[in-house]
């Protein structure tokens, strides 16, 4: 069988080979195109990344320049008149450093990477700062006419890109430090207030509970250190507790002592005491009014006796008038008892309050014992004698009236009434008359304006029961009221005193830390390793450096003013209530050595690479202020009902 | 004879097909080319990430300053420094400045180094961050170095390497970026002169850190 195809087998083979070559050629072409496309993609991506890298590096240069500007300005922050000029100074420095760094960097770039060429036509760039959230800094700079020429590694892709504006976040809380320092400086008067509060509380406690106020320079310095630390804590959330602890070393730490708080007697307390006296005086006035009608009753009885027929009803009328008068006298006696009751109520009230209050206890003692002078009877004695004497006299009067009424008959009525009238008249005079002082007692005192030593006169109206009467009782009780008012005037000085400040527990604990070894430069150490803040927020550390140059005490109470070494406070005897107020007053002046330093560190951001020793370290931004020279003064007034001494060491 | 010729044709045809087939199958997609493109793109993105990502995105970096002989706990101080907002590249640049090494006759001299812990902690931190970003797709080696400052008998330089080459493969791509040190060249030289009490050296220091990232197949 002979078979033949449409072409010879060899032709078909040639065609197949040609077809194969065509397919292989096409495949090779595809592969080449794909390689070229890949290279193109890589080049484009490479240029994009180069641009990103350049921008990031410019931002880094900007940040480093701002770091340096911030550090240099913040370390002498007080040399600028205000926040704006300070910011401008940082901007100027940062601009200068940034320009320098930028030029250097642009020159160096091609030696590291030939793909990048940076061109800048302006020689100077300006940096602007603004506040970012939480007091951080946002730095911005314009780079006009600055171009980056970027090309790919194979040189086939080349672009020119302008670098216009660059903005970067600077991780240092410059603005927060500035704000907190402003708070500290503006509220600096609080240091004096806090210190004064501590001096007050301590002095009152010492005067009342120990009877001796020792004005000690060491203690005053300690209080002042603590007050400064408290103000720092309020302003920055921390304080230089290591410095404060160092200052408190070797002395009793006032921050760890339980404060002895004596509350001065308040106006309200004195008014309550005066209320008892007022009611007693009111009762006495009531008795006086009742007794005042007895004369009228006797006159009425005498008139009946003269005008009416005594045999026929007149005598009965007279007896009725006299019985009515006797009832009024009984009523007057009751009023006197009420007055005595009110005074006893005053004593009971004081007695109850005395156990928990040294001030009330002292008043109670003054009213019930002869504290001013052994020969000067206490108010309790005088009132008790006065009530007893008045009661006896009124009772005698009542007996006379009752007896006259009972024994009266028509025949002797007129003469009996005359006799009664004379008797009543003679009884009323010692009972109702407000007498002159029976005797005088003199005690040493000091007058204030001008300060001088004087003898104060104390009047004695009731020296025994026989002196008792409505008039003398009234004199004594009114005198007591005047005494309370005098005491109140002094007590009000105590009411104005600042309350003792409460020391934060965190600060108390921090003050127990061991101080730094002597001889170290604390500021340098803090720049490297600031102490951890007391409060975690806002996370600032504080440094201060001040020395109390001198502490001065000047006595201002009259005795102390006259005789600076006078051992006790000035006695102010108060008549009638038998109390001596002991008035101590002095002004304490703390003078700081020239140029106290206050500095705050951004503890949470130790981000600045600073030259230290032989190398560099990460340091937090510091904000330093030389505090203006200042003298702090505290006037302390202590009024005690117990004698206390004042000494200086 | 004719039958023999046909058989010869068939054999030639079969031979041509057997040669053409592998060529055709290999032509359209070269796996090596795809890998290279991916590695290039990945390494570039990775470098950009290193330059822009901050430490707190990876948990923050803390290190302890050398105690330089002080009993720090007793003075209430803590030696810990916490850096959160600096970029990874910025940290490398600051590490370079804070840990410049002195080399004399080819030997590194250990001088008083307060920031040694920064160097150690940053190495660990960067490795952890890079492991997280690379996610096991490649092995890597990150090398950062400065140009040495030649002082004549000694030289100052910095070099550090962070790598994870567990796969033991081959290098597929390498990319370099530069980062400025936080100080200028003149300031750096002045600092060296003052710190080492050398007087004017009349040299220039290049305050630039080169960061090279190599990606390796696994």
Image: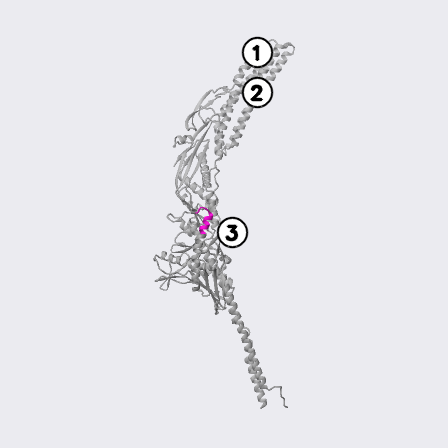
- Which label is found at residue A289? 2
The residue depicted at 56 percent of the width and 79 percent of the height is: A22
Q: Nearer the viewer, residue A89 or A443?
A: A89
Please say whether residue A88 is one of the residues in the magenta stretch.
Answer: yes
Residue A418 tag number: 1
Q: Classify A389 as above or below A529.
A: above
Q: Quick check: marks 1 and 3 in contact, CB under 8 Å?
A: no
Residue A8 placement (x, y as % from top left): 60, 87
- Using a 10 Å C-alpha cutoff, classify the residue at mark 3 as few (fewer than 14 neighbours), some (14 to 19) or many (20 or more): few
Depth order, front residue of A35/B146: A35
Left or right: residue A649 versus residue A494 is left
Instruction: Assign a secondary structure to mark 2.
Output: helix
Distance, label 2 to label 3, CA atoms, is: 80 Å
* Sequence-earlier tag: 1 or 3: 3
Residue A345, can we see it? no
Looking at the image, is B176 positioned above or below residue A293?
below
Element on which disc 3 rests: helix
């Amino acid at each position: 069988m002979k078979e033949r195809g449409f072409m010879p087998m060899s032709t078909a083979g040639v065609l197949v080979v040609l077809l194969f070559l065509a397919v292989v050629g096409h495949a090779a072409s595809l592969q080449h195109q794909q390689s070229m496309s890949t290279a193109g993609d890589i080049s484009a991506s490479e240029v994009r990344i180069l641009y990103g890298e350049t921008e990031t590096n410019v931002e880094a240069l900007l940040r480093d320049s701002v770091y340096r500007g911030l550090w240099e300005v913040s370390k002498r922050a007080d040399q600028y008149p205000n926040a704006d000029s300070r910011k401008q100074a940082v901007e100027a420095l940062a601009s200068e450093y940034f320009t320098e760094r930028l030029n250097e960097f642009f020159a160096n770039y091609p030696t590291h990477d030939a793909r990048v060429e940076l061109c800048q036509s302006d020689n100077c760039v300006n940096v602007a700062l603004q506040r970012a959230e939480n007091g951080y800094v946002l730095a911005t700079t314009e780079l006009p006419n600055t171009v980056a020429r970027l090309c790919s590694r194979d040189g086939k892709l080349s672009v020119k890109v302008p670098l216009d504006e660059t903005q970067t976040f600077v991780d240092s809380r410059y603005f927060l430090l500035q704000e907190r320092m402003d708070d500290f400086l503006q509220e600096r008067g609080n240091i004096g207030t806090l210190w004064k509060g501590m001096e007050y509380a301590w002095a009152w406690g010492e005067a009342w509970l120990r009877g001796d106020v020792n004005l000690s320079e060491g203690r005053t310095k300690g209080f002042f250190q603590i007050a400064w630390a408290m103000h720092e804590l309020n302003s920055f959330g921390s304080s230089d507790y290591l410095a404060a602890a160092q200052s408190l070393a070797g002395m009793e730490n006032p921050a760890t002592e339980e404060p002895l708080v004596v509350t001065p007697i308040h106006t309200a307390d004195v008014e309550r005491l005066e209320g008892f006296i007022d009611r007693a005086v009111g009762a006495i006035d009531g008795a006086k009014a009742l007794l005042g009608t007895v004369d009228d009753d006797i006159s009425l009885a005498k008139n009946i006796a003269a005008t009416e027929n005594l045999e026929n009803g007149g005598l009965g009328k007279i007896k009725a008038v006299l019985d009515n008068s006797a009832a009024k006298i009984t009523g007057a006696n009751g009023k006197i008892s009420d007055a005595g009751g009110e005074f006893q109520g005053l004593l009971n009230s004081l007695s109850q309050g005395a156990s928990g209050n040294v001030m009330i206890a002292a008043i109670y003692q003054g009213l019930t014992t002869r504290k001013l002078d052994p020969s000067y009877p206490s108010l309790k004695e005088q009132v008790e004698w006065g009530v007893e004497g008045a009661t006896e006299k009124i009772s005698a009067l009542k007996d006379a009236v009752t007896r006259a009424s009972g024994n009266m008959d028509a025949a002797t009525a007129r003469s009996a009434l005359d006799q009664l009238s004379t008797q009543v008249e003679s009884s009323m005079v010692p009972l109702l008359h407000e007498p002159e002082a029976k005797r005088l007692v003199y005690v040493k005192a000091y007058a204030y304006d001008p300060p001088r030593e004087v003898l104060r006169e104390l009047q004695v109206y009731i020296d025994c029961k026989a002196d008792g009467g409505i008039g003398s009782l009234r004199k004594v009780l009114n005198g007591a009221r005047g005494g309370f008012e005098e005491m109140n005037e002094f007590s009000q000085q105590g009411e104005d005193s600042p309350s003792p400040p409460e020391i934060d527990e965190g600060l108390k604990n921090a003050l127990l830390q061991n101080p730094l070894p002597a001889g170290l430069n604390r500021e340098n150490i803090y720049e490297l390793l600031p102490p951890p803040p007391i409060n975690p927020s806002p996370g600032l550390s504080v440094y201060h450096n001040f020395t109390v140059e001198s502490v001065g005490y000047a006595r201002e109470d009259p005795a102390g003013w006259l005789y600076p070494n006078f051992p006790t406070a000035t006695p102010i005897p108060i008549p009638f209530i038998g109390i001596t107020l002991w008035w101590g007053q002095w002004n304490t002046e703390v003078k700081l050595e020239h140029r106290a330093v206050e500095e705050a560190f951004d503890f949470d951001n130790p981000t600045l690479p600073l030259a230290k020793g032989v190398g560099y370290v990460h340091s937090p931004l510091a904000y330093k202020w030389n505090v203006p020279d200042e003298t702090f003064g505290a006037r302390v007034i202590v009024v005690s009902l117990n004698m206390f001494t004042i000494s200086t060491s | 004879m004719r039958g023999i010729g046909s058989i010869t044709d068939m054999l030639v045809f079969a031979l041509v097909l057997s040669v053409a087939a592998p060529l055709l199958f290999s032509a359209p997609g070269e796996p090596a080319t795809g890998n290279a493109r991916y590695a290039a793109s990945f390494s570039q993105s990775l470098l950009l990430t290193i330059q822009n990502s901050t430490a707190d995105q990876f948990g923050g970096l803390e290190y302890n300053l050398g105690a330089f002989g002080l009993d720090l706990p007793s003075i209430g101080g803590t030696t810990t420094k916490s850096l959160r907002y600096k970029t990874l590249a910025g940290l490398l640049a600051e590490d370079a400045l804070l840990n410049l090494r002195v080399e004399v006759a080819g030997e590194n001299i250990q001088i008083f180094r307060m920031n040694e812990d920064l160097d150690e902690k940053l190495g660990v931190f960067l490795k952890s961050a890079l492991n997280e970003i690379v996610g096991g797709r490649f092995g890597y080696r990150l090398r950062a170095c400065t140009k040495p400052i030649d002082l004549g008998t000694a030289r100052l330089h910095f070099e550090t390497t962070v790598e994870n080459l567990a796969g033991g493969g081959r290098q597929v791509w390498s990319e370099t970026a530069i980062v400025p040190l936080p100080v200028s060249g003149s300031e750096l030289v002045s600092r060296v002169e003052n710190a080492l009490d050398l007087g004017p050296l009349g040299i220039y220091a290049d305050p630039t850190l080169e960061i090279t990232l190599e990606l390796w197949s696994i």
